[in-house]
């Protein structure tokens, strides 16, 4: 049966007015659609009786009407079992755009209780467009009187508004995410171009100078220029390697080759690389007597250590660096501590994000914000954790953990110290 069921007319005052007021307010104020629907339907039940309510929404991609929500408030009802009954009434209301009342005879009455079922199907209208159907079901009670049908229509409009609010909120969030992505891409391109241009500028400048036919250079100056060209070319390669690593890590294409490795060797090799790169840097090792053997990708873990040490050199120059290790509960924890300027608290939660750099240090030190992101991904790929503790003015303390395999080889009495 289709067609307008009730003619417009005033609502009863009192409880109903309070409930409709509260429903309208929930719609205006709620951000949590599921909780909002629960609250609206519980309030609705104070003004007209139903045992179950279900909501079907039109899916624009599949063209189907799909169940989106169900709530059973009557005795012994379950959402799942009661969902199926709502579909025909929801479809009819959706197709016709009208409130419909279906009555089903579910067999002879039992113990004086009627087995008739009433389904009230309401179109969900949003800005003049029908987006689905809402169905109230009442089992075995008196049929819906016209004033209840009008209240149900009121609830349906408000539920429609609640869903529209959700659609708008999702759309805004998605537009904001797109804008943020575009902003990050722009920033990425400008950072990367700047970072690529700087070493290229040096290389081009010094090579052009060396090639000048109207000038001659003594061997020392020539060697000095060539060393700069060499260093800047290394920097360029490192930058490109970092970019490639970070994109492979992001897409999970950077494979790790795990093998047995002595932690002592890893640490010492990294320290000696650092010392040869930065001869002025003071690095102290405070290690346990017996360092474990690990099952890790040595190149990648060395990359993490080298990165933390080179950051200490970049951001905490002249400050001594201490490397510590402790083994506990099947994990080894490695710490790299400097006594440099530290990191302001508000930046700490973001340090391991891709391209994140502490803003006011950007100009002073060259970098891309990829180093710590790469470290985090490598440590996570080994089932470890990485973190930082830092306070402005009191230095920075990076740490990471790696699992220690259960079966350890007999500890060597003498490991390199
Ligand atoms: P990059 O060095 O290329 O900027 P990282 O990801 O290695 O990128 O580091 C992110 C940021 O963390 C740096 O820009 C720097 O501000 C901060 N940082 C890293 N290590 C230290 C440190 N030891 N002391 C102070 N700040 C640091």
Image (cartoon, rainbow, N blue to C red):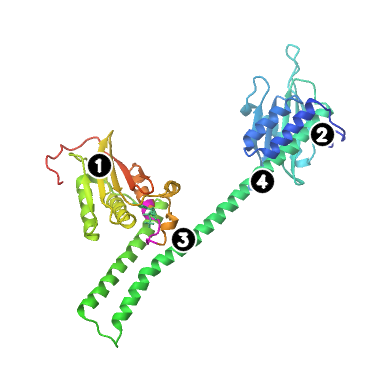
Q: What residue did someone put label 3 on?
A: 188
Q: Earlier in the sequence, mark 3 or mark 2?
A: 2
Q: Nearer the viewer, mark 3 or mark 2?
A: 3
CB contact under 8 Å: marks 2 and 1: no
Q: What residue did someone put label 2 on?
A: 1
Residue at position x 25%, y 43% from top?
324
* Res. 143 image quadrant: top right
Q: What residue did someone put label 1 on?
A: 325
Q: Earlier in the sequence, mark 1 or mark 4?
A: 4
**Mark 3 burial class by Cα count in 10 Å: few <14, some 14-19, many 20+:** some
Q: Earlier in the sequence, mark 3 or mark 4?
A: 4
Point out the stretch of residues depicted in magenta: 364-372
Residue at position x 84%, y 33% from top?
5
Judge whether residue 239 is colored magenta: no
Q: Earlier in the sequence, mark 1 or mark 3?
A: 3
Q: Residue 371 appears at what percent x and percent y?
A: 36, 54
Q: Is residue 77 above or below residue 388?
A: above
Q: What residue did someone put label 4 on?
A: 63
Q: Nearer the viewer, mark 2 or mark 1?
A: 1
**Left/right of residue 289 with respect to residue 141 in the rendered view:** left
Magenta span main SS: loop
């Amino acid at each position: 049966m289709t067609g307008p069921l009730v003619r417009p007319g005033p609502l009863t005052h009192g409880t109903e007015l309070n409930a409709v007021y509260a429903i309208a307010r929930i719609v205006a104020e709620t951000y949590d659609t599921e909780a909002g629907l629960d609250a609206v339907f519980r309030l609705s039940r104070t003004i007209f009786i139903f045992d179950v309510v279900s909501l079907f929404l039109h899916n624009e991609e599949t063209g189907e009407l799909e169940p989106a929500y169900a709530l059973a408030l009557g005795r012994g009802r379950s959402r799942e079992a009661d969902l199926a009954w709502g579909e025909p009434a929801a479809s009819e209301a959706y197709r016709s755009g009208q409130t419909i009342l279906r009555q089903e005879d579910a067999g002879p009455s039992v113990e004086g209780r009627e087995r008739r079922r009433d389904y009230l199907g309401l179109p969900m209208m949003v800005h003049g467009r029908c987006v689905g159907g809402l169905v109230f079901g009442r089992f075995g009670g008196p049929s819906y009187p016209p004033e209840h049908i009008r209240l149900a229509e009121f609830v349906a409009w408000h539920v429609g508004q609640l869903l529209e609010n959700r659609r708008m909120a999702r759309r805004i969030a998605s537009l904001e995410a797109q804008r943020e992505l575009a902003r990050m891409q722009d920033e990425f391109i400008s950072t990367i171009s700047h970072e690529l241009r700087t070493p290229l500028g040096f290389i081009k400048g010094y090579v052009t100078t060396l090639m000048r036919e109207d000038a001659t250079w003594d061997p020392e100056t020539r060697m000095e220029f060539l060393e700069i060209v060499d260093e800047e070319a290394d920097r360029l390669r490192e930058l490109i390697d970092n970019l490639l690593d970070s994109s492979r890590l992001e897409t999970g294409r950077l494979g790790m080759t795990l093998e047995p490795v002595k932690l002592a060797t890893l640490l010492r090799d990294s320290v000696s690389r650092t010392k040869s790169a930065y001869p002025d840097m003071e690095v102290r090792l405070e290690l346990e007597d017996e360092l474990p053997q690990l099952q890790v990708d040595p190149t990648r873990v060395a990359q993490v250590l080298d990165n933390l040490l080179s950051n200490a050199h970049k951001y905490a120059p002249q400050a001594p660096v201490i490397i510590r290790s402790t083994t506990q509960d099947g994990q080894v924890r490695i710490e790299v501590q400097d006594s440099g300027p530290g990191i302001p608290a508000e930046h700490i939660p973001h340090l391991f994000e891709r391209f994140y750099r502490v803003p006011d240090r950007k100009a002073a030190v060259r970098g891309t914000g990829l180093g710590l992101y790469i470290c985090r991904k490598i440590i996570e790929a080994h089932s470890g954790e990485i973190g930082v503790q830092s306070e402005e003015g009191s230095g920075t303390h990076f740490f990471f953990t790696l699992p220690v395999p259960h079966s350890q080889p007999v500890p060597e009495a003498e490991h390199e110290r």
